[in-house]
Image: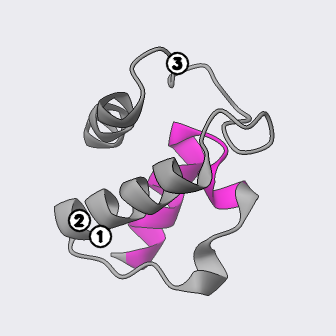
């Protein structure tokens, strides 16, 4: 989970990712941020994130991202 927060902070360090629960719904992560995030997650965790996984529920919080990564590993 710490690695995910570090990746998110590289994209935008003005957000408190440990508390934010609506990264996509509140437009805190834009499409470029999501594309960057997907690439970083795939490289860091040696996973493949299919288009079917790119739904707000998987990207709204660091915890949701961590759950998706664990499921895909």
The residue pinned by badge 1 equals: 42
The residue pinned by badge 3 equals: 15
Residue 11 sits in quarter: top left
Q: In what quadrant of the picture does the N terminus appear?
A: top left
Disc on res. 67: none
Residue range in magenta is 57-72
Kindly report the distance in space between the C-alpha atoms of the residues bearing marks 1 and 3.
Answer: 22 Å
According to the image, what is the colour scheme of the structure?
Answer: one colour
Label 1 crowd bin: few (<14), some (14–19), many (20+), radius 10 Å: some
Kindly report the distance in space between the C-alpha atoms of the residues bearing marks 2 and 3.
Answer: 23 Å
Q: Is residue 9 left or right of residue 22?
A: left
Between circles 2 and 1, the one closer to the viewer is 1
Instruction: Please give the name of the residue rendered at 63% of the width and 59% of the height, measured from the top-left corner.
Output: 58
Kindly report the distance in space between the C-alpha atoms of the residues bearing marks 2 and 1.
Answer: 6 Å
Instruction: Please give the name of the residue rendered at 28% of the width and 32% of the height, measured from the top-left corner.
Output: 6
Residue 2 drawn at (x, y percent): 29, 33
The reply to whether discs 2 and 1 touch (Cβ–Cβ < 8 Å) is yes
**Which residue is farthest right?**
25
Instruction: Please give the name of the residue rendered at 52% of the width and 18% of the height, measured from the top-left corner.
Output: 15
Q: Is residue 32 above or below residue 22?
A: below
Disc on res. 45: 2
The reply to whether discs 2 and 3 touch (Cβ–Cβ < 8 Å) is no
């Amino acid at each position: 989970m710490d690695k995910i927060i570090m990746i998110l902070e590289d994209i935008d360090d003005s957000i408190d990712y440990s508390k934010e629960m609506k990264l996509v719904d509140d437009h805190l992560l834009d499409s470029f941020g999501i594309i960057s995030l997907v690439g970083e997650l795939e490289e860091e965790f040696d996973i493949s994130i299919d288009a079917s996984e790119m739904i707000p529920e998987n990207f709204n919080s660091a915890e949701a991202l961590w759950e998706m990564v664990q499921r895909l590993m």
